[in-house]
Image (cartoon, rainbow, N blue to C red):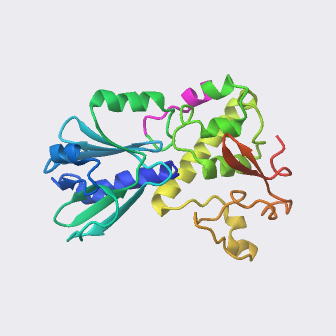
Amino acid sequence: MPEGHTIHRLASDYAGRFLGTAPRVTSPQGKFSDAAALLDGAELTSTEAHGKHLFLGFRDADWVHIHLGLFGKVAFGDAPAPPPTGTVRLRLANDTSYVDLRGPTTCALVTDAEKKAVHDRLGPDPLRADADPRAAYRRVSRSRTPIAALLMDQKVIAGVGNVYRAEVLFRHGIDPYRPGRDIAPAEWDAVWADLAGLMREGVRDNRIDTVRPEHTPEAMGRPPRVDDHGGEVYVYRRAALPCHVCGGEIRTASLAARNLFWCPACQRT
């Protein structure tokens, strides 16, 4: 499932190609046809991301709520748009560009009130200007749940997925099984600031890189990582490989229904 930086990047890409235009809106697959007909030719006035949720604003109060889930894909192209292939749930097209949405978990036309309800159930997003890290810490500091599970809870902090949670805990030497209530305020501030910085880089580069300069392939004289997710990381999907910092073996286990990765030697506290 895409992490929050991808959704913020999509919000920017939709805006760059369609904001201020009145695109043709269609649903070649047919599952969004009624809503598409209502939006066809309406001006795209805003785009917004909160965690893993994307919102496309039309006119004054019409919103398309998109959640890609595990299988959703978005593909942009230059005009003229070719005939749609496969199961295109939503296509936007104008005189210069088109974009196809396939396989989302959610693609729904919602009101302002329904959109607000989505925001209200989500935790603060490190990439949003209105994010309050103290709100997230209030939930973390009251919980006996392992910090690695809390970081994946979208009600606690929105947009963090399996890669960012594993990597930020490694970067701060935090045992992923430490209860949230044992995370000190200063530690949380550092984790939050690091997440915000890493995720902003993810938006910019459209990939996740978490290794510090001294641990890049060039600095260490090692081969670059080869993985479908791309990017240089410390522990994510590196089970049984040597840690870039201490040389110890990276471990994996299931936590919060996802595979957790960590270095026991580097993450002792």
| 209 with respect to 9 (left or right) | right
Residue 206 appears in view: yes
| 175 with respect to 129 (left or right) | right
Image location of residue 243, percent across then percent down: 80, 61
| 10 with respect to 222 (left or right) | left
Residue shown at 42%/50% (left/top)?
Answer: 8
Depth order, front residue of 102/17: 102
Residue 13 appears in view: no
The stretch of residues the image draws in magenta is: 129-138
Image location of residue 267, percent across then percent down: 80, 47
| 192 with respect to 178 (left or right) | left
Residue shown at 67%/37% (left/top)?
Answer: 149
- Main SS class of the magenta portion in the image: helix
Image location of residue 87, percent across then percent down: 34, 59
Depth order, front residue of 20/100: 100
Image location of residue 42, percent across then percent down: 15, 47
Depth order, front residue of 89/237: 89
